[in-house]
Amino acid sequence: MLQEETKFSKKELQFLYRAFKNECPSGVVNEDIFKLIYSQFFPQGDSSNYAHFLFEAFDTNKNGCLSFQEFVAGLSLILRGSMYDRLNWAFNFYDNDKDGFITKEEMLKIMKSIYDMMGKYVYPSMHDDIPREHVEHFFQKMDRNRDGVVTIEEFMESCQKDENIMRSMRLFDSVF
C-alpha cells in the first residue's frame, strides 16, 4: 500500500493523486509533459534542463514515464525522508552517470541548469562563470583527498558538517 511505502497520510496521498490525475489524466507523465508542468513554477527562466535531471531521478524504472507511484515515492523521499535518505538522493541526483562519483562536469551541468531555471531576471548581473565558481567552491569543500571526484562518503561527511547545507535540507520538512 502506498501509504506504508511513503511517509504521506491517506489524506495527503488523495490530494496528491487528484493533482497528479488533473495534470496527467492518463496516470503517467512523459518527460516533455513533466518539463511543461515544471516550467509553470519557474516562468522567469528555462527549467527544461533541471526538469530533465529531476525527471530522470524520479523515473526509477527508467521507462521514460513517471507513474503516480514513482512521483510520490520521490516526493516522499525528498520531503519526508531521513537526512541520510535526502543526502543520498542528492548525491545520486548529481552523479549523472551513476558511477559512484560526482565529477566537476556533472556538478556543472546541474549548477548551470539551476541558474538557467532561476533566470536572468533573478540574477541580472550574473556572469557565465558563476556556476563554475560554485562548482570549484563545492569541490574545495568536499573533495577531501583532492582526487578530482567526490565520493558518497565525502559528500555525506561534508554536508553533515556544513550548517548551511543542513539548514537548506531541513527546509523541506515544512513544505507539505
Image: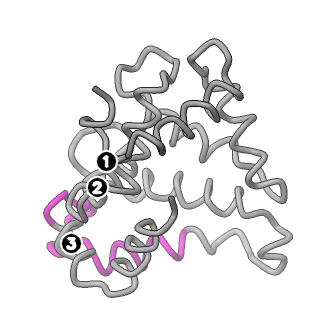
Residue 146 numbered mark, or none: 3
| Region rendered in magenta | 132-153
Whether residue 35 is situated above or below residue 69 in the rendered picture: below
Q: Dot 2: what SS?
A: loop
Report the residue at 78% width, 63% height from top. Answer: 119
> 156 or 176, which is in the foreground?
176
Q: Amino acid at mark 3?
A: Arg
In this rendering, would 133 be left or right of 150? Answer: right
Earlier along the polypeptide chain: callout 1 or callout 3? Answer: 1
Q: Amino acid at mark 1?
A: Lys
Mark 2 or mark 3: which is in front? 2
In the rendered structure, does residue 142 fall within the stretch colored magenta?
A: yes
Q: Amino acid at mark 2?
A: Gly
Q: Quadrant of residue 24?
A: top right
Whether residue 17 is situated above or below residue 105 in the rendered picture: above
Q: Which residue is mark 1?
A: 7
Q: Quadrant of residue 25?
A: top right
Cα distance in 3D space between marks 1 and 2:
8 Å
Do the residues bearing badges 1 and 2 touch, measured as CB atoms within 8 Å?
yes
